[in-house]
Amino acid sequence: MFIKKNLLSNSVINLIIITLIESDYYPHKYFHFFVQNRIVSGQHLFDVRKDLSEFRFSAGMGFSINSIKK
């Protein structure tokens, strides 16, 4: 109980800004391709100053399931 209470009292909120650029391509009715760039900017300022900034790149193929009848 003491450890849990101590961890909760040392909580801090850090501001992080995220910029997202995404592109989707639907060549077929049942699947699509996507490319995503994400830029994360922020700092951890509680006990040790750490840079949380990063650049993420994601790509892949997704499957589409038609659940609504037109």
Image (cartoon, rainbow, N blue to C red):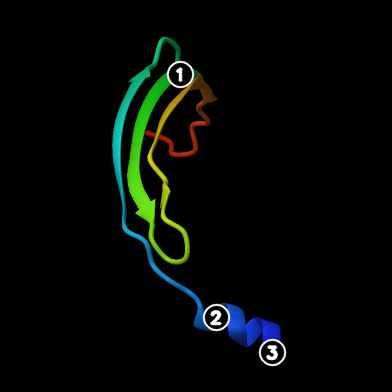
Work out whether mark 2 precedes mark 1 in sequence or the reverse, and give the earlier one: 2
User: Based on the displayed image, in which of its 4 quarters is residue 5 positioned?
Assistant: bottom right
Location of residue 37 with respect to 11 vertically, above or below: above
* Residue at the disc numbered 2: 8
The picture places residue 4, in percent across and down from the top left corner, at: 66, 82
* Residue at the disc numbered 1: 32
**Residue that extends furthest to the top in the rendered view of this protein:** 27
Q: Secondary structure at mark 3?
A: helix
Q: Identity of the amino acid at label 3?
A: Phe
Disc 3 crowd, CA 10 A, few/some/many (<14, 14-19, 20+): few
Q: Identity of the amino acid at label 2?
A: Leu
Front-most of residues 64 and 34: 34
Q: Secondary structure at mark 1?
A: strand
Work out whether mark 1 precedes mark 3 in sequence or the reverse, and give the earlier one: 3
Location of residue 58 with respect to 14 vertically, above or below: above
* Residue at the disc numbered 3: 2
Nearer the camera: disc 2 or disc 1: 2
